[in-house]
Image (cartoon, rainbow, N blue to C red):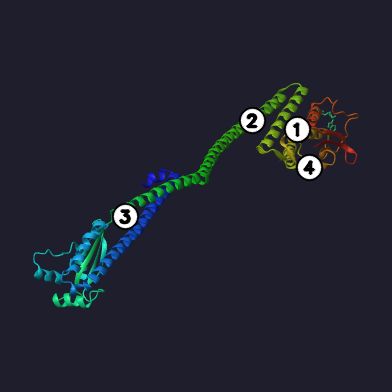
Amino acid sequence: MLGSWNRIGLKAQFMMVTALNVAVTAIGVVILVGWFQSQQIEEKLHSFSVNELQSLHALVISAMNRRPGDTQNVAIGVFNDWFQGRNTDYPGKLWSVWGAKTTAYMKTQDSARPSKRPADAIDKEALRTGKPVGRFINGAYRYSLPIVFGVTRGADGKNCVMCHGQLMGEKKGGVIAVFSSSLSTAADFAALRRFLFLVLGCAIVAATAMMGVIWLVFERLVSRPLTMVTGAMTALARGEKLLHQKDEAIKYQSLITKESDHRLLNAMQMVAGLLSLQSKTSSNAETAGQLLIASNRVSMIARIHRRLNSLDGVQTVAFRTFLEEYCREFSEMLSLEEGAKRIVVADGVEIELPAATVVPLAFIVSELLTNAVKYSKGQIAIRLEADPEKGHLLSVSNSGSALPQGFDPDGSKGLGMKIISSFVKQIDGELRFGPADGNQGVQFTVLFS
Ligand SMILES: Nc1ncnc2c1ncn2[C@@H]1O[C@H](COP(=O)(O)OP(=O)(O)O)[C@@H](O)[C@H]1O
Ligand SMILES: [Mg+2]
């Protein structure tokens, strides 16, 4: 039950609750109107009946005043004929009932004459209580007006006491007679029914129109925005799932990349190892030297590669930190070979450089350090500074002998200077060279932005 209620959706639920409300309200209105209208009908029929019987009563009083001298019973005749005449055009029926004492008395006078007996329970109630009785019964409005001896106006007169009191033995408070009226309610209630059907019809039309308006408002203010929100949430959820899938794909991709980088580095180390081995087995000293240089370059490439890889996907690199670590490694290698600590990174300012600039700079530094180690025995210093012209300045200097006379990096035969020149061009930098501070030794400076 609750399950199917939940299944039908918010809009249908809302409409059903509203419809129920409207139906209950419409039924309530019809019941209230019906009750009020039937009260009105009762009031109307009551006053109509009272009016008629009071009028009859007035006639009876005036007729009874004439009784003493009325030997021909004209007054009684007029009274009885009144019913016949009035009942032809009365919208119902009028009659009279004798009280117990009158009935008994009449029996003694004329036993053949039929007595006026109570017609129904209303007559009996009026006779018993001495109070007027009026109510709906069997499709009619019944009203009975008792004439009470010594109480009802006109039933306390001289003539009355003489006849009903002394002759018939009526006591004060005893009911002499009952005047009765019965009015058909069929027409009134048919009209009421028609009216109620009209009200119900109007209520249904109004309710249907109202439901239509509510439906439209719900559609516009609640249902449509809700559908949109639901749609947006579904799309978001779908997007989140796609993002999750993308994340997974990226994770997988980076795993694969790391794996292949790892293999590449191992392969490079292997090549460096092979070249070094070959240099040792070579009988020609020059070839052996070249092979060793080649081996060092390959392992240097591998080192730079590994260092950049350890930075793992970053777009920029803190270059001074990078240099410090690189130089420490280089110094350790060197001290293993020469037993001396020679490279110092000094006066560095930290700068963030794109990885694409760091790779060529690392190669340049490597070549410059190699030369400084090769051509001098003294201290080597690397400095990273801000340059007002180009932006940044990287210098490698060493003490010891100066550069050869007429030194031209582009005209140099060695591979080292060629590599340096080519990478300086690649980063759109500028290479300067000359004696170091104190006008001795050598200093190479790379300016770049
Ligand atoms: N720090 C330095 N001190 C003295 N001379 C240098 C220095 N760096 C380079 N040179 C000179 O520049 C030349 C070219 O260097 P390079 O191209 O690296 O070739 P290689 O190192 O094989 O000699 C060297 O032969 C050397 O004469
Ligand atoms: Mg060299």
Cβ at disc 2 under 8 Å from ligand 2: no
Whether residue 127 sits left or right of residue 361 in the image: it is: left
User: What SS does tag 4 mark?
Assistant: strand
Q: Which residue shows up at 81% across the image and 35% down it?
A: 372
Q: Secondary structure at mark 2?
A: helix
Residue 129: image location, x then y, percent:
21, 70
Residue corresponding to mark 1:
360
In the picture of the structure, the residue carrying the numbered disc 3 is 188
Q: Secondary structure at mark 3?
A: helix
> Mark 2 sits on what residue?
266
Say few, some or many: other residues with alpha carbon within 10 Å of mark 2 (under 14 / 14 to 19 / 20 or more): few
Q: Is mark 3 within 8 Å of ligand 2?
A: no
Image spot of residue 119 (x, y percent): 18, 62
Which amino acid is tagged 2?
Answer: Asn
Q: Which residue is mark 4?
A: 344
**Which residue is pictured at 21% across the width and 60% down the height?**
84
Disc 3 packing (10 Å; few <14; some 14–19; many ≥20): some
Q: Amino acid at mark 4?
A: Val
Q: Is mark 1 within 8 Å of ligand 1?
A: no
- Foreground disc of the pair 3, 4: 3
